[in-house]
Image (cartoon, helix red, strand yellow):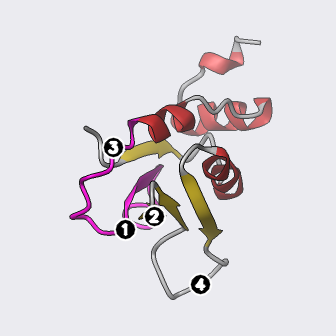
Amino acid sequence: MMFACEIDNAYIGLEDLARLLASAADVHAVRTRTPFSATTDSLITFEYRSVPFVVLEPFGDSSRYWIGPDNPDAFEVDVSVLEQTLRSHRPRRWRRFVGDLVSLRFGSLWRR
């Protein structure tokens, strides 16, 4: 059972991630942190299956978003369905191109 997941932030921005989370099953109350807010490290907060979840960027300047329960002891929620929704996201062509350049994955340069 998975209790958290990570995704590359080179392929999805916070606004798109918030929209994707809001469209996922069992996700409610999606809130994005205001820019330059010093109140929390959470970039996005939401409820998944009635459990408070957060989106964090580990170490403040990471290449990944960590998505998991706000309370680290809340292991009772399986996020595998949520992870499938996040993995199914297909970024727009320009975002995929920039993401491939940043992450040094050049696969989309030759795909259509």
Measured as percent of width and height from the top left, residue 91 is found at: 70, 34
| Label 3 environment density (alpha carbons within 10 Å; few <14, some 14–19, many ≥20) | some
* Amino acid at dot 3: Asp
Query: Mark 4: which secondary structure?
Result: loop
* Amino acid at dot 1: Asp
Of the numbered discs 3 and 2, the one sitting upstream in the chain is 2
Q: Are marks 4 and 1 in contact (CB under 8 Å)?
A: no
Label 4, label 3: how many angstroms apart (C-alpha)? 30 Å
Q: Residue at x 63, y 51 (%)?
A: 17
Which residue is under mark 2? 54
* Amino acid at dot 2: Val
Label 1, label 3: how many angstroms apart (C-alpha)? 14 Å
Of the numbered discs 4 and 2, the one sitting upstream in the chain is 4
Which residue is under mark 4? 37
* Left or right side of 103 for 90: right
Q: Are marks 2 and 1 in contact (CB under 8 Å)?
A: yes
* Mark whose residue sits in front, 3 or 2: 3
Query: Mark 2: which secondary structure?
Result: strand
Q: Start and end of the magenta stretch?
A: 57-80
* Mark whose residue sits in front, 4 or 3: 3
Label 4, label 1: how many angstroms apart (C-alpha)? 18 Å
* Amino acid at dot 4: Ser
Which residue is under mark 1? 70
